[in-house]
Amino acid sequence: METPRLLLRRLTDADADFILELLNTPSWLRFIGDRGVRNPDDARGYIRNGPQHSYEQHGFGLDLVALKESGTPIGLCGLLKRDYLDHPDIGFAFLPDYAGKGYGYEAASAVIAYARTELGLEKIAAITDPDNTGSIRLLEKLGLRFRKRFFLAGTNEDLLLFETD
Ligand SMILES: CC(C)(COP(=O)(O)OP(=O)(O)OC[C@H]1O[C@@H](n2cnc3c(N)ncnc32)[C@H](O)[C@@H]1OP(=O)(O)O)[C@@H](O)C(=O)NCCC(=O)NCCS
């Protein structure tokens, strides 16, 4: 997928170093969680068991977001299917150097348009930490609306659910 400034594509094993960096940024660890990815082997395991497994199972998953001009990987954006949500949800994360530049909005708008036109999804959800101001603002800008605050069963994770109309 292509936007004015970005390319979105499937993750491969060759993206392990980028995944290792992204999954250990303070904002990922704080707002998404510690996935225990500490070396390139762990990162390859994450790519295979997470995004690549989802591509095979659902035909969608978190994709790599790169700058079109240089090819530099800057983040992840895509759809996930979680057992505890009725609808696929959109996820996004960018390296700190590339946050706050409108890339999140650009990538997520393209993912939502693709979900509607190519995948035929009528509703798209999103979950976020109540303290994640940037994510909440981005979801509202994308047109998703707050539905409820809930605790994820069996955990102490306090989450906000957003959905498209
Ligand atoms: C949350 C995140 C994806 C937002 O992406 P982004 O590229 O920075 O967002 P954009 O630049 O497209 O901005 C979208 C809107 O959100 C606002 N925004 C972005 N970050 C913000 C912040 N930290 N605080 C307040 N508003 C913020 C922008 O100002 C913009 O709104 P505006 O047009 O009204 O000014 C990014 O900050 C990130 O990767 N965070 C770490 C990982 C994460 O938390 N992922 C979400 C898990 S649910």
Image (spheres, rainbow, N blue to C red):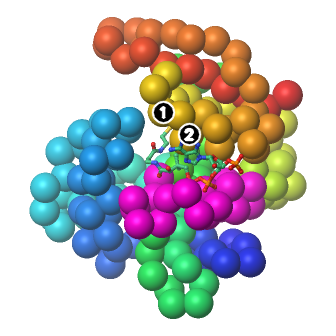
Instruction: Using a 10 Å C-alpha cutoff, classify the residue at mark 2 as few (fewer than 14 neighbours), some (14 to 19) or many (20 or more).
Output: many
Residue 72 picture quarter: bottom left
- In this rendering, position of residue 29 left or right of residue 95: left
Instruction: Using a 10 Å C-alpha cutoff, classify the residue at mark 1 as few (fewer than 14 neighbours), some (14 to 19) or many (20 or more).
Output: some
Please provide percent x and percent y for residue 45.
Answer: 25, 57
Tell me what residue is drawn at x 56 percent, y 20 percent.
Answer: 160
Of the 4 image quadrants, the one containing the C terminus is: top right
Of the 4 image quadrants, the one containing the N terminus is: bottom right
Residue 107 picture quarter: bottom right
Residue at mark 2? 135
- In this rendering, position of residue 8 left or right of residue 45: right
Residue at mark 1? 132
Question: Tag count in the figure?
Answer: 2
* Mark 1 within 8 Å of ligand 1, using the beta carbon: yes
In the displayed structure, would residue 13 be above or below residue 90? Answer: below
Q: Amino acid at mark 2?
A: Ser
Tell me what residue is drawn at x 53 percent, y 68 percent.
Answer: 65
Residue 69 picture quarter: bottom right
* Mark 2 within 8 Å of ligand 1, using the beta carbon: yes
2 and 1 marks in contact (CB < 8 Å)? yes
In the displayed structure, would residue 44 be above or below residue 38? Answer: below
Tag on residue 15? Answer: none
Residue range in magenta is: 93-111
- In this rendering, position of residue 130 left or right of residue 111: left
Please provide percent x and percent y for residue 113.
Answer: 81, 55
The question of residue 122 being in magenta is answered with no
Please provide percent x and percent y for residue 127.
Answer: 55, 29
